[in-house]
Amino acid sequence: MKAVIIGAGEVGYHIAKALYNTHDVVVIDIDERACERVDELDVQVVQGNGANVSILTEALEGANILVAVTGSDEVNIVACMASKLVAKNKDEFKTVARVSNPDYVDKPVTKRTKIGIDIMICPELSLASEVAGIIAIPSAIDADYFAEGKVEMMEFVVPEDNDLVGKDMKELNLANCCIVSALFRDTEVIIPHGDDKIEANDHLVVIGKPAAMDGVRNKFGHKGGRRNKVMIIGGGIVGFYLAKLVAKNEFDLVIIESDPQRSVQIAEELPGVLVLNGDGTDVNLLKEEGVGEMDVVIAVTNSDEKNLLCALIAKQLGGKKVIARADRSDYVPLFEMVGVDSAVSPRQATVKEVMKLTMDSAIESITIIEGEKAGVIEYTASKKSKIVGKPLKNIKFPPGAIVSIVVHKGNTVVPRGDYVVEEGDRVVVFSLQSENAEVEKFFK
């Protein structure tokens, strides 16, 4: 497959990085420094305006997908529309546009095929949805659903004071419809076995039936029975959309926004939420508003540096769990290194959608975890799939991948070695990024 990427910023660079090993990639950007950075990868780089029809016509020769991820919504939209007009293989050619303005999109991922955009992604709204999914669980740092909600994935951090520290994995005593698919320890990725020891600060990826996941949450420190207190610092696109999602649940919510007019607008649209006009780095304000009693504090301003400062102040003042937005990908590990419980990046949603379009047609959904080290991928097994009709123990799956869950005729099961995948089964696989291509072969 040939992919053309317009925009060599953070999002464009990471899409190119995810694709160049298995696809032909062309990256177009007008900025010389951005072109120099992406030129470090084995891709073709074109310096110029990605919305220029003559540049597009040449770059799109033989292309299957165009991804427009510049910092301008309008350039991205125009580039997709123009590409649909000049592409020769219109029936198979796909376009993806990244947009941030809520006037263009009202949900994280949508379609605008009538104007030439197959997938329109708002990373900010996707980020807000992701944070809302994990906000109520103190030790969770990621969450997603598969197979129309029949399978839930959660990534937990094991607190130092948790009773599980030092125990064998088998002592988790998970329900039959749940499994620990992976363990991340420092830079190491482990597909665990029953005798593996659990250590403090391990990240465990648990996949299972949603009805059984409440028991898993309790093991990792989630205590129900009271309303969670949540503080959001920053009332921009991410903060406002997140507040709308959180306000639907049983949370006590406080928003701190520095712009007076924006504060008034949020207060009018969310009448049941306390909105404060102030600076999230103001220690006195945070103390007065009880940041030390907050279960979760989320800093989602448009400044990575301010988000880090807000999160660290909140943590120092007693906030139980702090989450910070980091637009720059190289900041994510640094934020977590200095004390932020979870650093989240809006670029992840765009990378995920593009990977879905460029991977095998059997893929239903994909979630990227631990900074693109690995992913959880949902496949639909077809009659021709190599995985169908044989016991799993007889299938030579790559060592960095494991079949975690199978949904068979609506029933969610953790497959054992003698399980036989049938046509139509929804198969949820944990896989290191380096193993994705090998895993795909079993579903073609």
Image: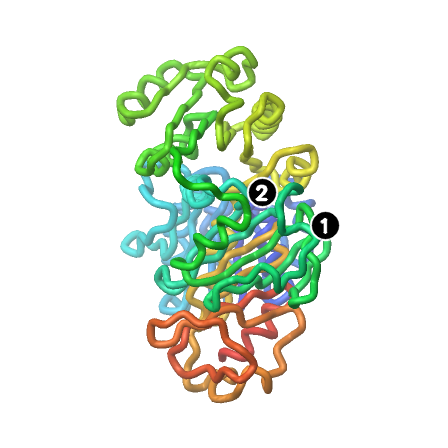
Q: Is residue 33 left or right of residue 96?
A: right
Q: Is residue 226 above or below residue 18?
A: above
- Mark 2 is surrounded, within 10 Å at the Cα level, by few (under 14), some (14 to 19) or many (20 or more) other residues, namely many
Amino acid marked by disc 1: Asp
Q: Secondary structure at mark 2?
A: loop
- Residue at 49% over, 46% down: 69
- Residue at 38% over, 27% down: 253
Location of residue 340 (image quadrant): top right
Q: Position of residue 18 (x, y in %)?
A: 60, 58
- Residue at 45% over, 86% down: 384
Q: Is residue 246 left or right of residue 258?
A: left
Q: Earlier in the sequence, mark 2 or mark 1?
A: 2
Where does label 2 land, which residue?
9
Q: Is residue 289 above or below residue 21?
A: above
Q: Is residue 255 above or below residue 199?
A: above
Could you say which is closer to the camera, residue 382 or residue 24?
382
Amino acid marked by disc 2: Gly
Q: Position of residue 359 (x, y in %)?
A: 51, 67
| Residue 186 disc label | 1
Alpha-carbon span between mark 2 and mark 1: 28 Å
Q: Is residue 338 left or right of residue 252?
A: right
Could you say which is closer to the camera, residue 185 or residue 125?
185
Q: Position of residue 312 (x, y in %)?
A: 62, 26
Could you say which is closer to the camera, residue 286 or residue 398?
286
Q: What colouring does the structure picture have? A: rainbow
